[in-house]
Amino acid sequence: MELGSFTSAIELAATLNILYIAVEFSKSYSYIIIRHIVQIDNFVTRCKEECYAHLDEETLKNIPDNIAGRNTKKLREALSIDISKEKSEIAGMKDFFNQLISKRIKASSICFSCISLYLFLFCILSLFYSGVQNEHIFIDMFWLLFTTLSYIIVLGLSLFDGYIHRWVSLKLILMALFIISIISGIITYIASFTTNPIQQNFFIYNYLAMSVVMTAILPYIHFIIYTIKTYYIVKELKGAMNSHVDETKKRCLEIENKINNFNSFKSTYEQLEISLPDA
């Protein structure tokens, strides 16, 4: 199996990876995509509609300063402050959700950009390798080692981005590429003195085709992982936003209950004044 059969796929992967880096750094592509999928405006609109219905300031204003000889001014002022506080929080909810999204995708965005740079360079090297494949067994051995170590780098960054993003940078990725190349070269050099022709032919027969397949798949594998992780990130963000809206609605409902209790007590007292004869 020749890697030359997959050069078009590798060229496409190189284009996608370098394009992602350019768009991510210029327009925060990940943030825009997640924000579009989550649809923040729907959450904010629902919260306004459901919460504002419970914040009845007119009813609160109509409650007298004195009911049954008890001063209600301080309690009414406290409820008025609570209403203003909730309305202010609802007004700033869109910014809060934007910050929540930005914070959540930061790790994925950093690591994915670094992976894309690594895989862009990997694709370029793959195209060079396709021109010299089968020229010498140790070139093929070097490439298999290099590809295997690249899988470890890509999968590690993709799966554990939440833990290692603080230490990941484009500079570090370039260093990793260089170190992996050195390690692969050293192992290949040692193998050239420690293997015999039978072992070398065994390698060609069993691993060369696998090396080609691994090379063709690697530039795309992180896109698959990224898509799956994006699904769960969106699910997590929607859950967090729903919880935030529900908590806000709960507080607004408590305010409404307090206002209704005031109003109910007022109505009861007025009824008592009407129905009871003067002493």
Image (cartoon, helix red, strand yellow):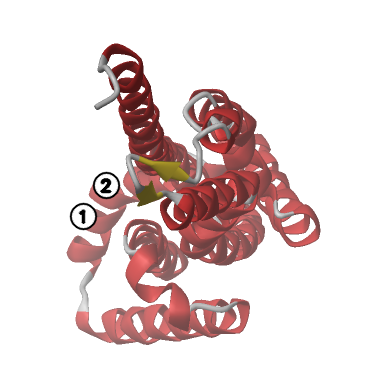
Q: Is residue 158 above or below residue 272?
A: below
The x, y position of residue 51, in whole percent, is 49, 31
In this picture, residue 21 sits left or right of residue 277: right
Q: Residue at x 36, y 34 (%)?
A: 262
Q: Which residue is rendered at x = 55% and y = 66% of the image?
A: 110
Residue 265 is marked as: none
- Classed neighbour count for the residue bearing mark 1: other residues with Cα under 10 Å, few (<14), some (14–19), many (≥20): few
Q: Looking at numbered disc 1 in the image, what kind of residue is underneath it?
A: Phe
- Which SS class for mark 2? helix
Say which of 13 and 252 sits in front: 252
| Amino acid under disc 2 | Tyr
Q: Nearer the viewer, residue 230 or 61?
A: 61
Is there any visible trace of residue 236 in the rendered image? no
Q: Residue furthest right?
A: 26
Above or below 55: residue 135: below
Residue lying farthest top?
275
Judge left or right: residue 232 versus residue 27: left
The quadrant of the picture occupied by the C terminus is: top left
Label for residue 202? 1
Q: Residues within 10 Å of mark 2 (few under 14, many from 20)?
A: few
Residue occupied by mark 2: 205
Q: Please tell me whether mark 1 sits on a helix, a strand or a loop.
A: helix
* Quadrant in the rendering for residue 261: top left
Q: Return the x and y of residue 186 as percentages of the image width and height.
A: 37, 87
In the displayed orientation, state which residue is furthest to the front: 279
* 137 left or right, relative to 53: left
Image position, residue 114 (x, y; %): 57, 67
Q: CA distance from mark 1 to mark 2?
A: 5 Å
154 or 225, which lies in front? 225
Mark 1 in CB contact with mark 2 (< 8 angstroms) = yes
> Foreground: 62 or 219?
62
Quarter that holds the N terminus: top left
